[in-house]
Structure formats: structure tokens, C-alpha cells
Amino acid sequence: MSLLQKILISLVGMVLAFYFYSGKEEFKPEMLKGKRVIVTGASTGIGEQIAYHLARMGSHLLITARTEAQLQQVVAQCLELGAASARYINGSMEDMKFAQAVVKKAEELWGSLDMLILNHIGKSYFNYFDWDIRHVQKLMDINFLSYVTMTISALPMLKNSGGSIVVVSSMAGKIGFPFTVTYSATKFALHGFFSSLRQEFVMQNTNVSITLCILGLINTESAMKAVSGRFTSPPAPKEECALEIIKGGALRQREVYYRYMDTKIFTVLRDWAPEFIDYLIRKNYNMDNLKQD
């Protein structure tokens, strides 16, 4: 089969998938009214915007991040926007005891939980891999093990409520991107863990959905700072991205791709034309700026 045939088949499959999913249940903001939701990494960026959307929908919110002052501001804004309630707990997800404490706080506040949105990431670099194993370990703790820890802690409440787990990931968890070696490793780990866990939930008749969110470049402050002058593709807006993540979780979708065409086509073609996809990815980088570091 020629490369062109493979591409055409992939495009047809994507069109059919679009029609298939468009026929499913329609999202309504009322779905989140009164729901009890944890949002991690909510002091800035996508997590902050998720919190604001949920506030407008009338959810109960527990948000977390490292910086207390920023969390206080987000909570205040959430209350102004109409959140049923909004609280915060600050700390580092490098500490698994803190990850457990976040879930414990939700249990103390509400006695149950409807949605766990895992969005936090540790600070990393955007450049050639520097062979620092300590950085790898630290990022695995924050970007992966804390997600697992929170999921384990929250499962009893989520099982009782028939709730949802929403995992904010990246195209870097589906395809190997240069200059994000450690970050990409943590995202691949998330996909392996949560995809396998979803299978077990189905086999055990566990009524907890798992939604993996595969995102492209989003215009968060941290992402824009990291790729400034180095990556040529335009970013997508964090506000719209946050809303798509919420929709996917509320509708209990298997995966959310954002932006859809920018991300889905690469993941569909990666196995059929891996060299071509790798080439297209490399073409998006400004190598001159990278060499300056």
C-alpha cells in the first residue's frame, strides 16, 4: 500500500470518527452543576482556565498548585464567577504525601468526589537531553507517580459516585518529540498506566471513566516561554482547550484531541509513516535558536 493510500484511508477514518462521535450525547454546562471536582495545577495556564469554566458551571472546586498567593486569587475569581464553593490546598506534587492530602481534603469537605482532573507538571527544559538522571526521577515523581497516587486515593470516592478521571497529557505522550525527552517519557507512562487501568475497569464493571487529553502546543505562559523562538507552529488558546477538557470528562470520552486536526492526524499516521511524521515534526523547530544554548 502506497503512502498516499495510507493517508487517504486515515483521512476517511477521521471523517467517520467525527460523525460517530458527533452523534453522541451533547455537552451541557448543567452537567457540572453541583459536581465536586479536584483540579491540580490550577494556579496558572490550562488548570486555571479549567477552574474558571467549572466555576461558571456551578461546581464545587478544590484546586491545588505550589504557589499559595496565586491559588488564593484563583479561588476568589471562581467564587465571583459562581462556583458552588471553592477551596485550595498548596504544596508540591513531588511529595506523595501531599498528593494523598489533596484527596483527603476533598473527602473532608464533601465526603465524595465526582471528577478528578490531573493537570499538574513539574518544571522541565526544552533542549537536548542532558543525561541528568535526577531530573528524570523528579519529573517522573511529579508528572506520573503523583497522578497514580491521587488516583489510588480517590478511587473509593469515585467508585461510589460513578465519577470520572481526566488526565491532561500531550502529543508528546503519543509521539516522540525532540527536546522534551524526560517530559515525553512521563507522558508515555501516563498513557500506558491509564489506558491499561481503563481496560481493567471495564473487565471489573467499575463505573469510573478515564479520559486522556492529547494536547498540542497551547498558549500558556510557561509553554510560550519554553518554545519562544524555537518552535514555529502557532499555539492554541488555553481557554478553549480547558473547555474541551471539561467536555471530554463530562461526556466520559475515551480521549480528547485538541486541536483535533492538528493532533489526531499525527497520531493516526505515526505507525503507517513514522519517518514522514518525524520529518514533519523536525521541520517545526528553529535549530539555530536551539544551538545558541
Image: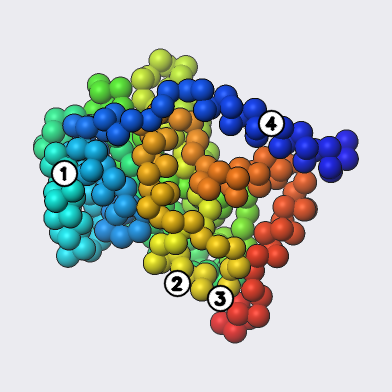
Residue located beneath label 1 in the image: 82
Q: Upstream in the sequence, badge 3 or badge 4?
A: 4
Please identify the quarter of the rendering in which residue 114 is found. Answer: top left
- Callout 4: SS: helix
Residue 181 in view, yes or no: yes
Q: Is residue 25 above or below residue 274?
A: above
In depth, the one of 103 and 222 nearer the eye is 222
Is there CB contact under 8 Å for labels 3 and 4? Answer: no
Q: Position of residue 121 (x, y in %)?
A: 39, 56
Residue located beneath label 3 in the image: 229
Q: Is residue 122 above or below residue 81?
A: below
Alpha-carbon neighbours of circle 1 within 10 Å: few (<14), some, or many (≥20)? some
- Callout 1: SS: loop
- Between the C-alphas of marks 3 and 1, the distance is 39 Å
x 56%, y 50%: residue: 171
The three-letter amino acid code for the residue at tag 2 is: Lys
Alpha-carbon neighbours of circle 4 within 10 Å: few (<14), some, or many (≥20)? few
x 41%, y 66%: residue: 222
Q: How is the image coloured?
A: rainbow
The three-letter amino acid code for the residue at tag 3 is: Gly
Which label number is shown at residue 146?
A: none
- Between the C-alphas of marks 3 and 4, the distance is 35 Å
- Between the C-alphas of marks 2 and 4, the distance is 36 Å
Say whether residue 256 is left or right of residue 10. left
x 84%, y 37%: residue: 5
Say whether residue 260 is left or right of residue 249. right
Which label number is shown at residue 13?
A: 4
Alpha-carbon neighbours of circle 3 within 10 Å: few (<14), some, or many (≥20)? some
Residue located beneath label 2 in the image: 225
The three-letter amino acid code for the residue at tag 1 is: Gly
The three-letter amino acid code for the residue at tag 4 is: Gly
Q: Upstream in the sequence, badge 4 or badge 1?
A: 4
